[in-house]
Amino acid sequence: QVQLVESGGGLVQAGGSLRLSCAASGSIFGIDGMAWYRQAPGKQRELVARITIGGSTNYADSVKGRFTISRDNAKNTVYLQMNSLKSEDTAVYYCNADRWVRNIRSTYWGQGTQVTVSS
């Protein structure tokens, strides 16, 4: 099993910045892609950004140019730097990790961290 623990959420004014962190522990061998998702009230969970173990990234159009995902493989940690925050970024942000063992994929989720952007 893989445990994912997020931190760094909170309340920020529009235009401000926050940095989320997600530390993986447990059976971390085989972890490949890590990602951040978010879910706003009444909406479906959506992908915010993803990063492979090699560092390739992709972003939702709504956050391109404002958010940056990065990872420290030595620390088994993924980060999400969020700049120029908007009220529509308000959501619970979830860390996600994919683990491959013997060609079997398992997906893990963190408990979520609340990000609230006040206008």
Image (tube, rainbow, N blue to C red):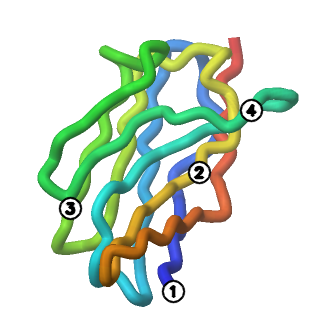
Using the numbered discs, state the Cα–Cα distance from disc 4 to disc 2 in whole angstroms: 13 Å
4 or 3: tag closer to the N-terminus: 4
2 or 3: tag closer to the N-terminus: 3
Q: Which quadrant would residue 14 be assigned to in this image?
A: top right
Callout 1–callout 4 Cβ contact below 8 Å: no
Q: In the displayed image of the protein, which residue is found farthest to the right?
A: 42
**Residue, disc 2:** 94
Q: In the displayed image of the protein, which residue is found farthest to the left?
A: 54
Residue 52 at what x, y percent from top left?
24, 51
1 or 4: tag closer to the N-terminus: 1
**Residue, disc 3:** 72
Q: Is mark 3 on a helix, strand or loop?
A: strand
Instruction: Give the residue displayed 52% in from the left and 78% down from the top.
Output: 3
Callout 1–callout 3 Cβ contact below 8 Å: no
Question: Given this view, does label 4 or label 3 mark the residue nearer the observer?
Answer: 4
Left or right for 62, reference 86: left
Q: What residue type is labelled 1?
A: Gln
Q: What element carries label 1?
A: loop
Q: What residue type is labelled 2?
A: Tyr
Q: Which amino acid does label 4 sit on?
A: Gln
Residue 103 at what x, y percent from top left?
32, 74
**Residue, disc 4:** 44
